[in-house]
Image (spheres, rainbow, N blue to C red):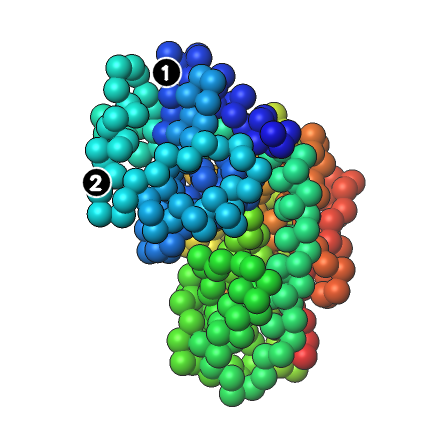
Amino acid sequence: MRKEVEEKLCRIRSFMENEGYQGVLLTLNENFFWMSGGRCAFVDKSTGVAASKLFVTKDKQYVICNSSERFRVMEEELLEGEFELISYLWHEDEKNVLNSLLLDGRYASDNGICGSDNREADIQKQRYVLTEAEIVRYREIGLECAGIVEECCRRIHRGESELEIAARTVQMLMEKGYQIPVCLVAADERLKKYRHPIPTEKQVDKYAMTAICAQKYGLTVSVSRIVSLGAVDAQKTKRMEAVQRVDAAFILNTKAGVKAGDVLEKGFSAYQQEGYAEDFHLHHQGGALGYLTRDYCVNFRTEDTILDSQAFSWNPTIAGVKSEDTFLVSGESQEVISHTGNWVYKEITLNGRSILRPDILVI
């Protein structure tokens, strides 16, 4: 068995033992990706429920597939023989199959199906600390994904619509095996007005931003880039420099053992110092991510402590500008995995530490 899968099974079984469960049923796409080591079980992307489920007991682990899924899953996804197959016909009731497994004991699941205890939040926390194998994959896709987004941005031209920019971005990412749950594109006044700009037929005149959450191996890379067709005006430059300093404050204060809410306070203070406190309230600031686009968006009620080997992405915005990358926490350090070195950057120094933040690319 792969070391990664073995480690994750140990986490689930430790949870089972501590909570007095005989088994855990994993039904959500993000948990299938996680437990299987980056393997895929989705078919219909409009639902978060995996077409194939995983069931873990004290000494065995199973994959539950109907006849529509079993061959692809067993021949293309779960190749190592780590999960024993439980199959049923597509026209049979899946709940009857699951009910037969969840008899005579106490069971947990990530959605409360078939009378099991819904422990979705607790199961999600098992994913927070990345394994060595996941970190390797994350570094790979962070660089690759950001490089694709940046290349797409370099191709933006006057008169091109936001929808055309989004289509190119999605196509180039999917050609490399990504799913794209979030693709935001904004041009000119829409960039200044909206914090979550769904792409429209609006055509680019001067400025454009692309912001994506893209997933490969189930892991999410979150990144935003802005371009300008011609010189950047003074007011946008001022706001961009401010949001870069805010982002630097968020990232450099994201350390293992620190309360996530305390980092949010640091970021809010940075907004205030820059003179843009009101902008803080107009858009969530980001937070932890991994197998979801955000495991949690940090607010002032967040009690989570930042963990070593956890992934984060802050996304501060000020009207018309944004700064966003994905990074890994390593003790008191941060590794920005979506930094390609092939963009334009501004060096920001905070309390003796420096970090490069993406700037507006003039094309």
Residue at which label 1 appears? 21
Res. 168 in view: yes
Identified by mark 2, the residue type is Asp
Q: Is residue 319 above or below residue 328?
A: below
Q: Residue at x 53, y 32 (%)?
A: 82
Where does residue 316 sit, x and y in percent of width and height?
53, 52
Crowdedness near tag 2: few (<14), some (14–19) or many (≥20) residues, C-alpha within 10 Å:
few
Q: Who is closer to the viewer here, 19 or 27?
A: 27
Residue at which label 2 appears? 93
From the viewer's perspective, tell me whether residue 290 is left or right of residue 27.
Answer: right
Identified by mark 1, the residue type is Tyr
Quadrant of image for the C terminus: bottom right
- Residue at the farthest bottom position: 159
- Disc nearest the viewer among 2 and 1: 2
From the viewer's perspective, tell me whether residue 301 is left or right of residue 317.
Answer: left
Q: Residue at x 62, y 40 (%)?
A: 134
